[in-house]
Image (cartoon, rainbow, N blue to C red):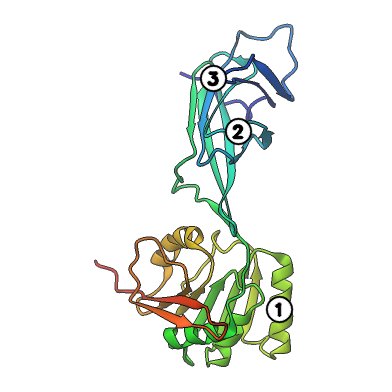
Amino acid sequence: MFTPRTARAFGLAFAVFFTSASLATLSVGAQPEKKDAAQKVKSKIKITLPREDAELKIEDKLMKVTGVTREFETPDLEAGKLYEYTFTTTWAPNNYTILTRTKSIEFKAGDDVVADLTKADPKVPDAAKIRWVPTPDDIVDEMMKLGKIGKDDVVYEPGPGDGRMLIAAVKKGAKKGVGIELDPKKAEEARENIKKAGLEKQITIIEGDALKDRDYSEATVVLLYMGNEFNDLLRPILDKQLKAGSRIVSHRFVIGDWKPDTTKTITGADGDEYLIHLWTVKEKKK
């Protein structure tokens, strides 16, 4: 039977293996040696990442190595004990999305460690940060029409940016709007615009992560312009929380393999073409 897991990893020091180079040591705070130390062993670590240029941290220490597969060796560990390392990778699948994935692995000192970060862990969902890009006002208006915004609607929007879609929804008759904005500066900008529109009582901006510990069950309409990757992460939340009859309206981006009920191509006032999608939540099968 293993002894109780030690507190994290005694700090970190890794010997980094290169394919065609001699062994190099990357020191980030190894545990000082003790005269009466128990038998020491090392573990080899093999990590697979989503992309060659993905950033990798181990126990919050940045590893300055590139490649899809990266190999390391732990500092001396106490034989027979359990350890836990947390691996965090960050990458940009496109120029407006940054994804962060975290995986913790418990292992016995001396055993090899294999960490596959190419696939998301449903128990530890990815975090997503999206660069805000405004939807033109005429396209916002078309989204309101497609979603059939009315007086009984409560409209939620993750990543509302300057608040323009929520303001438009309430002006179309929605009784309430809620935005969840990660960027403090954008949250403040949205509040200022809402104040100018005289809609402080109808629209609330929450500063925080729209994917973590959020309750969308009140929403009858969800407005989106966040990217396919973000929508994929949001999908299980909406699937679990939204009531039948609720609508989801998205500018451009889809939601995994959910087939939209309606997709419209709009020629904007600027002459460009825009796609908008509508989904209506169905009754769940018993």
Q: Quadrant of the C terminus?
A: bottom left
Query: What separation in Å lies between label 3 and label 1 (alpha carbons)?
Result: 51 Å
Element assignment for label 2: loop
User: Label 3, on which residue?
Assistant: 44
Q: Earlier in the sequence, mark 2 or mark 1?
A: 2
Query: What separation in Å lies between label 3 and label 2 (alpha carbons)?
Result: 17 Å
Element assignment for label 1: helix
Q: Earlier in the sequence, mark 3 or mark 2?
A: 3
- Is residue 219 visible in this depiction of the protein? no
Task: Give the residue displayed 41% in from the left and 64% down from the top.
Answer: 255
Residue 31 horizontal side relative to residue 47, left or right:
right
Residue type for callout 2: Thr
| Label disc, if present, on residue 66 of the rendered structure | 2
Task: Give the residue displayed 73% in from the left and 12% down from the top.
Answer: 33
Task: Give the residue displayed 66% in from the left and 88% down from the top.
Answer: 199
Residue 230's place in the image compared with 116, above or below, is below
Residue 60 horizontal side relative to residue 85, left or right:
right
Q: Earlier in the sequence, mark 3 or mark 1?
A: 3
User: Label 1, on which residue?
Assistant: 191
Residue 106's place in the image compared with 164, above or below, is above
Element assignment for label 3: strand
